[in-house]
Image: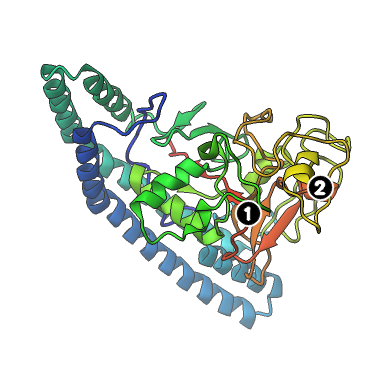
Amino acid sequence: MQGSRLLPAVLFVVFLTALHAAPPPELAALQQQYAFVVAERVTSPYNTGIEALNTKFLTALTNAGEEAKKAGKLPEALAIEEDKKFIASQLPLPEQDDEKTPASLTKLHAVYRLESAKLAQQRTVAHAALLPAYTAKLKELESTLLKGDRLEDAKEVMQYREGLGAEPTSPVTGKEFVNSLGMKFVPVKGTKVMFCIHETRFKDYDAYAAEDPSVNGAWKDQSVNNYTPAENKEEHPVVRVSWADAQAFCSWLSKKEGKTYRLPTDQEWSYAAGIGREEKWKQGTTPATVVKNQTDLPWGSKWPPPKGEGNFSDQSRKAKAPNSEATYLDGYDDGFPTTAPVMSFKPNKPGLYDLSGNVWEWCQDWYDNTQKDRVLRGGSWSSPERGDLLSSNRLHNTPDLRFADRGFRVVLEQKAP
């Protein structure tokens, strides 16, 4: 939810080489030391403040709910219960209240947003206070590497330092951002996040798993029906990851870079797919109940898909990875029997790839109020049906499911200027 316990943006990593090599060991050591300091002096106090705010807000909601019940105000009581679910699911409050929002909730929301903004400002000030000393150490390292005739390493430190120096006054906003794994993010109109332009890759997840031996190893298996991609395997989307696995990856990446990475909400995903404005969300709406467009496909309304529109259940799958229970698109061959390397097909208008096909993408939300299943969007390489590929379509599965056509995409929260 707004002002959630997700880690703040504190470390601006812009170094990226063509091979995405690791930084010089001296720089990596400084980054690690700085991350510990940030966690102690910035992240921990902020998270503690948010926890206290959420507890206070929940108490106020409970009291307001009791008053509404005593007064016989059923719509108000139901709206308050919905707010409690938002807190439990760590989903954002609506940015604005509408005419149907009860007056009691409007007042509570205003107080919450004000207090959350104060905590965010305190976090920004605390982070800014740490940067001068850190920048001085980076300059010292840069000089040492230069004197040691390690010009390329010195250049990397300089590029990192220059990007870092802009962070306090130039938040992660704008046209694009590339993180330390080489994942590129762009803003999406109608949201306050930046979307990764591609699905999380095998190599992205590999970097995470290399640092955490406890990660479930199912993701390493890219085979389906006796077929395994032979080329550019690291560029394929990671599969056989559950919703919980995706959350753990986001948490690791947030800690690694001092930013807030997470799964997109269902509503944010709709904006990324170009249908966000037409979906009428209000308090109490869920992915299960939102009115869905049953016409629009990512490329228009034509069916079957025009050539080259994405990676679906096609003739190459039928030839190389057949399944007796599968169906295939007649006359469509995208060249990839199962997953395709990310960004193999043309992007949509915001510059995002594979929002249709390749792998189903986990979203943050519960599917409905039973809170048993999480949402997936976008269809996959195993999707042969028009309904699967509608921009508005939602799949839902239990959050522990791992399957060969499920993956995920991450978003990066933008800092307010």
Residue 218, horizontal then vertical, whole percent: 52, 58
Residue 28, horizontal then vertical, whole percent: 24, 38
Disc 2: CA contacts within 10 A as few (<14), some (14-19) or many (>=20): many
Asked if residue 407 is positioned above or below residue 341 in the image, the reply reads below
Secondary structure under badge 1? loop
| Alpha carbons under labels 1 and 2: distance apart | 16 Å
Q: Residue at x 65, y 57 (%)?
A: 375
Q: Residue at x 47, y 41 (%)?
A: 203
Residue 73, horizontal then vertical, whole percent: 68, 75
Q: Quadrant of residue 228?
A: top right
Task: List the residue tagged with mark 2.
Answer: 384
Structure colour scheme: rainbow
Inspect this view and state whether residue 302 appears.
yes
Q: Residue at x 26, y 37 (%)?
A: 128
Task: List the residue tagged with mark 1.
Answer: 404
Judged left or right of residue 209, residue 317 is right
Judged left or right of residue 66, residue 305 is right
Q: Quadrant of residue 231?
A: top right
Q: Kindly identify the amino acid type of the residue bearing the numbered disc 2.
A: Pro
Q: Kindly identify the amino acid type of the residue bearing the numbered disc 1.
A: Ala
Q: Quadrant of residue 192?
A: top right
Q: Residue at x 61, y 32 (%)?
A: 343
Secondary structure under badge 2? loop
Asked if residue 348 is positioned above or below residue 84 in the image, the reply reads above
Asked if residue 96 is positioned above or below residue 297 in the image, the reply reads below
322 or 114: nearer the viewer: 322
Task: Give the position of the C terminus as an image quadrant.
Answer: top left
Disc 1: CA contacts within 10 A as few (<14), some (14-19) or many (>=20): many
Inspect this view and state whether residue 121 appears.
no
